[in-house]
Image: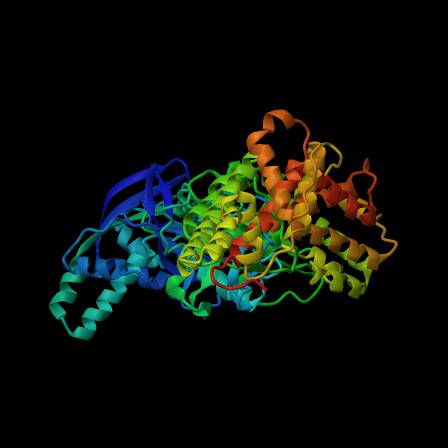
């Protein structure tokens, strides 16, 4: 192994080493990082023959593009001696992550196994001595890792949006306030209790607050989100904001649940309209659309100077009142049913509806202030006036 | 050409790589491109019961289309479901009413796979730009308001003989026309299907010649024309086609009868007196609806519309509906200069359209009407 270049990446503030090494040296470190890292993606079972083509080309000694890896900032130090880099890597394998070249790595492992099975020792030796290049980013934090992963797309099967969101907001997954539990998709558990929320939905709602936009996170938004989160982390206030958002949201859901109790949508509604958006108040409001609408509404009210922040929202929520819970649940389902039958993109329209709903009940100047039963219809009228 | 994306200013074909149900996406490769893969969002449950080779898809457009406009499609001549019609946006959402319907999900999955495996030479497709990290949806590849008609070949009596042109007039009545190269922004046709209904379709008669002309009148001309006078003109071109067939048949019958009665002067004279029935257009119109349809249509609404128009022009209203219709036609084609103004022509066009579609479907040669 030899380090052939040592540069500094100013964008992500990281040291970048270009290393020439044998496949043998590479696989020594790569094998161990494949299973351990929380960010590392699963192996892709591709239906294409491109990786079998790669295996054939490797046997012929082709030069493959550099594999890109990162040594994460958990390491604690970036002060290393490049002349002893091999030793350094061996000692810190658990902090390594493959940013680009995961499938190529699996191809090399597969090829080696295939040649071993065939008993072709010469071919194995040739392969193991074949030289490749690898780039190492030293001391990269999570945001930097994700930024590099998103922008390094050549040759890579993209990480899914769900995975990217979870990585980006991983710091928040452990947030614990007032007994609220955030359930990640990777946890493989169902949401069964009022104090449980989908981590991804809460993240989307928080993102809606940051962007003042209730529409779902698009993959291309993630690059902007990373930049926003970097700014927030510099202000050292990102987790506090997230906690504030979550507390405000939980206070609304708890209050709505307290006001509506066991009230459910009526049989008349079901007969007339079919399946409702939500059978009861928890089913209505624990969906991503409501969370995003809430986040966007708070953000806009804050921008308009109508509320100071989440504490004010929590204070106001205490004053919410619902006179007829059953009628309220029927009413909100009726509005959402109209949206379902009359809009080109139902999910986006639902989010916009909830945004108007929450603006109505949290804005002191509106007729529906603290009156969800009034807001249910006025939000729909507002949506219709803006879109039809 | 198949679906394509734009990468750094160059167009590349998309090729299906794999379906990732866990992450709700269809991963496609972009051969030859600096960006190797792109995701297409597919949040619906994967129901892969059907073989896509047993299906065909036809892109349609409907200006009134909303995401929940998902319909089963029936051939009313056999009361047989032959497919589904669904908006492209329905492939990108679990919020519509059919997101958990297993029958819909099977067709939706077939539609998704077929979209990546079908050539759209005669339809507008868009080529969304792929950035470094991108998730697309199927609706980004087509204009707004695009729907897919998904037909199961297994449900057809004669799959090889299936011609989508035969079904266009029926689809037109529901507001759907084929997506072609003309920008659907200019579409004037609107149509709304009742919730929870199905598309009940009947093909036009196979006794008709030039089905492609009929398809073109509905899909390329009528659908994009707002002016009622021109719309009537286009509709009447189809009527002319039908009348031509009536004339051809009647002429042939006349000749046969004359040959049979050759030498009998009295019978020959009687036959020749009926020549006016076929030489006059209004009589052929009457014959069309009395002799050349499997089932006689109701003319009440059309007659009412024509009579209102004639009354507004200060004209008398004939008794027979087809005479009334013919009189309207004459005024528009020959006396328009005398009757311009605020005339209820829209109503005439509105009633003529379904009436004409019905005639096209019921047209027959050689059988007596019921």
Q: Nearer the viewer, residue A7 or B43?
A: B43
**Residue drawn at 82 percent across, 42 percent down:** A369
Q: Is residue B184 left or right of residue B13?
A: right
Q: Position of residue A318 (x, y in %)?
A: 82, 49
Seen from this angle, which residue lies furthest top? Answer: B337
**Residue drawn at 68 percent across, 55 percent down:** A177
Q: Is residue B343 above or below residue A381?
A: above
Q: How many marks?
A: 0
Q: Is residue A42 visible?
A: no
**Residue drawn at 74 percent across, 36 percent down:** A308
**Residue drawn at 16 percent across, 60 percent down:** A59
Q: Position of residue B363 (x, y in %)?
A: 51, 57
Q: Is residue B108 left or right of residue A31?
A: right
Q: Within the image, what quadrant is residue B64 found in?
A: top right
Q: Nearer the viewer, residue B50 or B40?
A: B50
In the picture, the quarter occupied by the C terminus of chain A is top right
* Color style of the picture: rainbow
Q: Nearer the viewer, residue B150 or A112?
A: B150
Q: Position of residue A215 (x, y in %)?
A: 59, 45
Seen from this angle, which residue lies furthest left? Answer: A122
Q: Is residue B229 above or below residue B59?
A: above
Q: Is residue B70 left or right of residue B248?
A: right
Q: Is residue B300 visible?
A: yes
Q: Position of residue B216 (x, y in %)?
A: 45, 45
Q: Is residue A303 above or below residue A156?
A: above
């Amino acid at each position: 192994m030899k380090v052939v270049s040592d540069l500094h990446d100013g964008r992500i503030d990281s040291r970048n080493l270009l290393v020439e090494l044998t496949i043998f040296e590479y696989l020594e470190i790569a094998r161990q990082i494949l299973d351990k890292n929380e960010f590392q993606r699963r192996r892709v079972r591709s239906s294409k023959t491109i990786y079998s083509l790669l295996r054939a080309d490797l046997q012929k000694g082709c030069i493959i593009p550099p594999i890109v890896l990162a040594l994460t900032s958990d390491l604690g130090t970036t002060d290393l001696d490049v002349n002893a880099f091999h030793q350094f890597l061996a000692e810190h394998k658990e902090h390594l992550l493959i940013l680009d070249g995961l499938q190529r790595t699996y191809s090399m492992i597969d090829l080696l196994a295939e040649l071993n099975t065939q008993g072709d020792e010469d071919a194995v030796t040739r392969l193991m001595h074949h030289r490749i290049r690898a780039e190492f980013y030293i001391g990269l934090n999570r945001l930097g890792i994700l930024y590099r992963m998103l922008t390094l797309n050549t040759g890579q099967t993209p990480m899914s949006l769900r995975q990217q969101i979870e990585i980006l907001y991983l710091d928040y997954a452990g947030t614990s306030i007032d007994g609220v539990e955030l359930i990640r998709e990777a946890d493989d558990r169902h949401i069964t209790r009022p104090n449980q929320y989908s981590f991804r939905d809460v993240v989307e709602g928080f993102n809606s607050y940051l962007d003042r936009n209730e529409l779902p996170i698009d993959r291309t938004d993630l690059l902007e989100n990373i930049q926003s989160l970097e700014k927030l982390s510099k202000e050292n206030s990102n987790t506090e904001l997230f906690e504030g958002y979550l507390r405000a949201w939980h206070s609304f859901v708890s209050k709505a649940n307290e006001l509506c109790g066991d009230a459910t949508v009526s049989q008349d509604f079901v007969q007339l309209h079919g399946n409702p958006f939500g059978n009861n108040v928890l089913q209505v409001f624990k969906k991503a659309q409501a969370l995003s609408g809430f986040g966007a509404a708070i953000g806009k009210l804050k921008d308009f100077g109508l509320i100071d922040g989440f504490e004010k929202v929590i204070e106001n929520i205490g004053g919410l009142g619902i006179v007829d819970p059953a009628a309220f649940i029927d009413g909100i389902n009726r509005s959402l049913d109209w949206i379902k039958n009359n809009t080109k993109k139902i999910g986006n329209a639902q989010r916009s509806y909830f945004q108007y709903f929450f603006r109505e009940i949290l804005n002191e100047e509106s007729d529906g202030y603290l009156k969800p039963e009034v807001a249910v219809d006025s939000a729909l009228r507002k949506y219709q006036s803006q879109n039809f | 050409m198949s679906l394509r994306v734009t990468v750094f200013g160059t167009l590349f074909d998309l090729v299906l790589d794999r379906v990732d149900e866990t992450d709700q996406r269809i991963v496609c490769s972009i051969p030859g491109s600096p960006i190797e893969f792109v995701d297409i969002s597919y949040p619906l449950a994967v129901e892969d019961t059907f073989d896509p080779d047993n299906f065909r898809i036809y892109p349609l457009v409907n200006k009134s289309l909303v995401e929940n406009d998902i319909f089963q499609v029936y051939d009313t001549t056999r009361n047989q479901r032959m497919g589904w019609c669904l908006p492209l946006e329905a492939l990108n959402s679990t919020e519509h009413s059919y997101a958990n319907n297993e029958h819909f999900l099977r067709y939706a999955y077939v539609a998704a796979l077929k979209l990546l495996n079908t050539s759209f030479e005669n339809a507008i497709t868009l080529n969304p730009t792929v950035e470094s990290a991108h998730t697309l949806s199927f609706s980004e590849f087509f204009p707004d308001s695009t729907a897919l008609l998904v037909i199961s070949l297994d449900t057809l009596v004669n799959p090889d003989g299936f011609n989508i042109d035969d079904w266009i007039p029926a689809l037109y009545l529901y507001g759907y026309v084929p997506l072609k190269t003309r920008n659907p922004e200019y579409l004037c046709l609107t149509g709304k299907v009742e919730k929870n209904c199905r598309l009940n379709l009947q093909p036009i008669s196979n006794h008709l010649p030039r089905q492609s002309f009929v398809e073109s009148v509905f899909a390329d001309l009528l659908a994009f024309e707002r002016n009622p006078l021109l719309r009537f003109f286009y509709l009447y071109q189809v009527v002319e086609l039908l009348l031509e067939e009536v004339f051809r048949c009647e002429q042939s019958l006349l000749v046969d009868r004359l040959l049979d009665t050759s030498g009998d002067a009295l019978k020959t004279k009687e036959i020749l007196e009926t020549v006016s029935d076929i030489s006059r257009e209004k009589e052929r119109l009457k014959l069309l609806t009395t002799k050349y349809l499997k089932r006689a249509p109701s003319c009440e609404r059309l007659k009412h519309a024509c009579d209102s128009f004639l009354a507004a022009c200060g004209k008398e209203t004939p008794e027979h509906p087809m005479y009334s219709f013919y009189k309207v036609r004459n005024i528009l084609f020959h006396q328009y200069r005398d009757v311009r103004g605020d005339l209820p022509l829209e109503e005439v066009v509105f009633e003529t359209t379904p009436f004409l579609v019905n005639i096209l479907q019921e047209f027959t040669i050689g059988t007596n009407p019921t």
